[in-house]
Image (tube, rainbow, N blue to C red):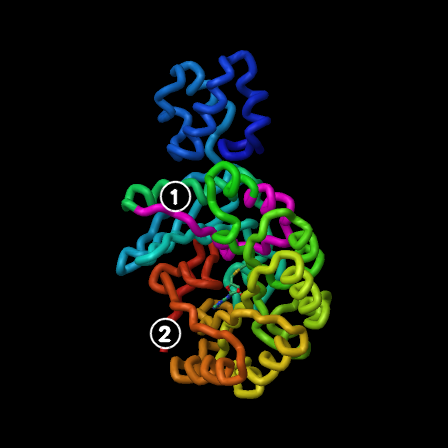
Amino acid sequence: MTTLYTPTRDELATLLEGEPRYRLDQVWQGLYTQLAEPAEISNVPKALRERLGAALPTALTQVIRKVSDDGDTVKYLWALDDGSKIETVLMIYPDRVTVCVSSQAGCAMACGFCATGQAGFRRHLTVGEIVEQVVVAARDARAMGRRLANVVYMGMGEPMANEAAVWASVERLHDALGLSARHLTISTVGLVPGIRTLADRPLPVNLAVSLHAANDTLRDELVPINRRYPIDQLMEACAGYLAAKGRRLSFEWALIDGVNDRPSDAAELAALTRRFHLPAHVNLIPLNPTPGYPTVGSPAARVREFRDDLVARGVNATVRRNRGTDIDAACGQLAAGQPVTLTRR
Ligand code: SAH
């Protein structure tokens, strides 16, 4: 379905045929600079605003908007035109504002520890649905006196399973919203063909890979798609990305108590990055609770030990501060309406 943020500039020009040529600039700026909906683009005539509003409905209908206790995280639950639900998370930091967007309704990757994976796949999102998540978050950030500059494709879904729409959204965010490619991060479970395609794309976006294990036996279990694209193939694709873009990669590692937080796991991870000459940054995330997974996150002391161990082995590693657990907005907790919070230890 064509929605407000679907058309490219050229497609919008076609839609505006018969109008004076400057209308295209006015509407484009209205949408992407003023972050306005057609009805609010006050410098174009009312009849045209109405025509645009009818031809280009918004994609996202707000179901719930939740703000975390300290007000620095906002989670939106949206309904799409077919009733599918997705979530978006806006994170306000002292020095930057970041939005975490969904690329699919649900996810087919079936990682057992992730609430989205537990729920299964519904459908791909369109470029219009992805871009609108960013625009709405940018509008909200602006209302708080802040400018949204960072986008992470770390919400629901596997971006590299929907590469074409994801890439079209990257181009739009870059060209129309003016976001720097260096502030856009695509996270993948490790779909090797997607990483290769991304390496051939022109803009140097950041790549994050959800690794979680550095040997195939454990990774097969945690991240089932590893059976199709085992670690060596994945690392080669990562090395290819690095060579093509010259950007530092990051690896995500959800620390699961007693599963992938042992000294041997740190040693394996360090050996892996060395073997492939990958100067990656490791983001450690203590596992967040989800209803369908029995195991819990590593205790704080273990998290610190694991980080120190990696650093001592020459691997750049930091612990990602957890955001929005109180509103089920943290990594792996996006379940579009199903409450995921469990009693915490
Ligand atoms: N499908 C993509 C994009 C999602 S990013 C990917 O897997 O990279 C969401 C991140 O949160 C991924 O790194 C994912 O592995 C991680 N994650 C999933 N469940 C989690 C949980 N319960 N606790 C912490 N991190 C989790």
**Dot 2 and dot 1 residues touching (CB under 8 Å):** no
| Residue 150 at x, y percent in the picture | 44, 51
Circle 1 packing at 10 Å, graded few (<14), some (14-19), many (20+), is many
Q: Residue at x 35, y 22 (%)?
A: 42
Is residue 174 in sight in this rendering? yes
Depicted 205 relative to depicted 277: above or below: above
Q: Closest to the observer: 227 or 267?
A: 267
**Residue 270 appears in which quarter of the rendering?**
bottom right
Q: Is residue 124 visible in this depiction of the protein?
A: no
Q: Is residue 316 above or below residue 206?
A: below
User: Residues under labels 2 and 1: Cα distance?
Assistant: 32 Å
Where's residue 133, x and y in %?
45, 44
List x then y, in percent, for residue 278. 62, 71
Quarter of the image for the C terminus: give it: bottom left
- Magenta residue span: 146-170
Query: Tag 1: residue type?
Result: Ala
149 in magenta: yes
- Mark 2 C-beta closer than 8 Å to ligand 1: no
Using the image as rendered, state which of residue 36 and residue 288 is in the foreground.
36
The residue depicted at 49 percent of the width and 13 percent of the height is: 20
**145 or 2, which is in the foreground?**
145
| First in sequence: mark 2 vs mark 1 | 1
Question: Where is residue 125 drawn, in percent x and y?
Answer: 57, 44
Tag 1 residue: 138
Task: Identify the residue under disc 2.
Answer: 344
At 26% from the left and 60% from the top, the residue drawn is 70
- The amino acid at mark 2 is Arg
Is residue 211 part of the magenta span, yes or no? no
Is the residue 80 above or below the residue 206 in the image? above
